[in-house]
Amino acid sequence: MFPQKLQNLALLTLDEARERRIKIATAESCTGGLIASLLTEFSGSSDVFERGFVTYSNRAKEEVLGIPGDLIADYGAVSEAVARMMAEGALEISRANLSIAVTGIAGPGGGTPMKPVGTVHIACARENKAVLHQACYFGDIGRHEVRMATIETALSMIREQIP
């Protein structure tokens, strides 16, 4: 299901987190749980992966992760502000030490001139560290490709926050 490159990156991420005794939580919108799925593809991942939240709808973001509806209304679900709050919310309500959050427009529809298809915001929160954020503009490269590119970027961000 996942390309070998992503599987290798996930194994490396799990190994590095395991060495540091870091538990990971995910908060996913446009990837629909694929990051959690990839991280749990491997035996022994339960000592690193804590839990995942699939908050695809705005209401789920509000109810599960505590994102204020006003914030979503003001900035849109696909925004830096919402991605950061998703990561912070996942960290706060889980027993994880690190969380990754993604929200975006995978396509083929749903884009606007201000937020075209392929726009994704990723945030990574870690206890006692500043939240990392990355805005990605993958373009209209196909739904699957946007999601795979998002996963790759998310895993890289997790690895940045581990040390």
Image (cartoon, helix red, strand yellow):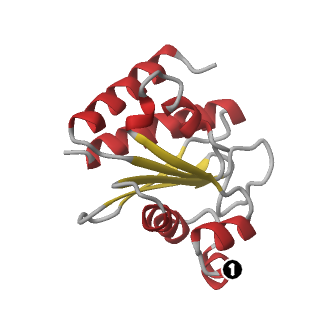
| In this view, 3 is above or below 26 | above
Residue for badge 1: 73
Residue positioned most to the bottom: 70
Compared with residue 148, is residue 133 higher up or lower down, i.e. above or below? below
Percent coordinates x, y for residue 64 in the rendering: 64, 67
Which residue: 68% across, 80% down?
A: 73
Q: In the depicted view, which residue is nearer to us: 145 or 33?
A: 33
On screen, residue 160 versus residue 40, left or right, reads left
At 51% across and 50% down in the image, what residue appears?
Answer: 26
Query: Can residue 47 be seen from the camera position used here?
Result: yes
Location of residue 19 by image quarter:
top left
Check the picture and name the quadrant holding the N terminus. top right
Considering the image in quadrants, where does the C terminus appear?
Answer: top left
Quarter of the figure with residue 71: bottom right
Classed neighbour count for the residue bearing mark 1: other residues with Cα under 10 Å, few (<14), some (14–19), many (≥20): few
**Residue at position x 44%, y 68% in the image:** 92
Tell which residue pokes out farthest to the right in this image.
Answer: 109
Q: Is residue 126 left or right of residue 62?
A: left
69 in relation to 54, above or below = below
Decide: is 149 above or below 154.
above
> Image check: 61 left or right of 13?
right
Q: Secondary structure at mark 1?
A: helix
Q: Residue 116 placed where, x, y %?
A: 67, 53
At x 67% / y 81%, what residue is drawn? 69
Give residue 108's position: percent from left, percent from top: 78, 41
Amino acid type indicated by mark 1: Ala
Q: Is residue 142 visible?
A: no
Where does residue 34 sit, x and y in percent of width and height?
A: 61, 36
User: In the image shown, does 95 or 152 lie closer to the viewer?
Assistant: 95
The one of 112 and 71 positioned closer to us in this rendering = 71
